[in-house]
Image: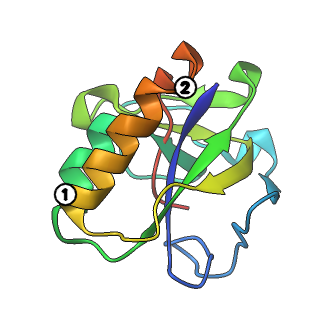
Amino acid sequence: GMGYKIINEDWTDCYTGKISNHIGAVVSMDRKAVNSNSEQTCSTGLHVCSQGYLDSFFASSSKRVVLVKFNPRDVVSIPTDYDNSKMRVCRYQVVKELVNNRTGDALKTTVSLWLNSSTKETHTCTGGGQ
């Protein structure tokens, strides 16, 4: 599957500020350490989101957005908040940064154009966070 990841300007995760999310990086953690309870909306795990989540998050954000790919077997839970638009996984790979100009309107336009020119697989849910 493919999804999105919201990260800091310095290419680290937003939660700890320590996990590198540079292009090509493979990020993983022990599956047992990822919270599998979908009712616990903010919890441990590597977070990935859908375009819908980006639309709600990026109205006034200066964070980077990267495209990540993951194996569906690495999805541990899909929290019930934000209309199931984010998930916790135990492994993903950073593919590319989506935009250089990270204003909300530019992001939406770029993501929309990118999705329209890509495979259907890119519509799979993934998320922000760690």
The picture places residue 7, in percent across and down from the top left corner, at 51, 68
Camera-side residue of 65 and 126: 65
Question: In whole angstroms, how far apart are the C-alphas of marks 1 and 2?
Answer: 20 Å
Q: In the figure, is residue 129 to the left or right of 19? A: left
State the mark number for residue 118: 2
Q: Residue 73, image x and y in percent?
A: 75, 20
Residue depicted at 55% across the width and 26% down the height: 118
Q: What amino acid type should be assigned to the residue bearing mark 1?
A: Asp
Residue drawn at 44 percent across, 30 percent down: 115
The foreground one among 47 and 1 is: 1
User: Residue 83 falls in which quadrant of the image?
Assistant: top left
Which quarter of the image is occupied by the N terminus? Answer: top right
Q: Is residue 39 above or below residue 63?
A: above
Which residue is at a point 72% across and 42% down the rendered structure image? 90
Would you say residue 22 is visible in this rendering? yes
**Residue marked by disc 1:** 105
- Front residue of 103/6: it is 103
Circle 2 packing at 10 Å, graded few (<14), some (14-19), many (20+), is few
The amino acid type of the residue labelled 2 equals Ser
Mark 1: few/some/many CA within 10 Å (<14, 14-19, 20+): some
Using the image as rendered, state which of residue 77 and residue 128 is in the foreground. Answer: 128
Any part of residue 50 in sight: no
Q: Position of residue 97 (x, y in %)?
A: 58, 59
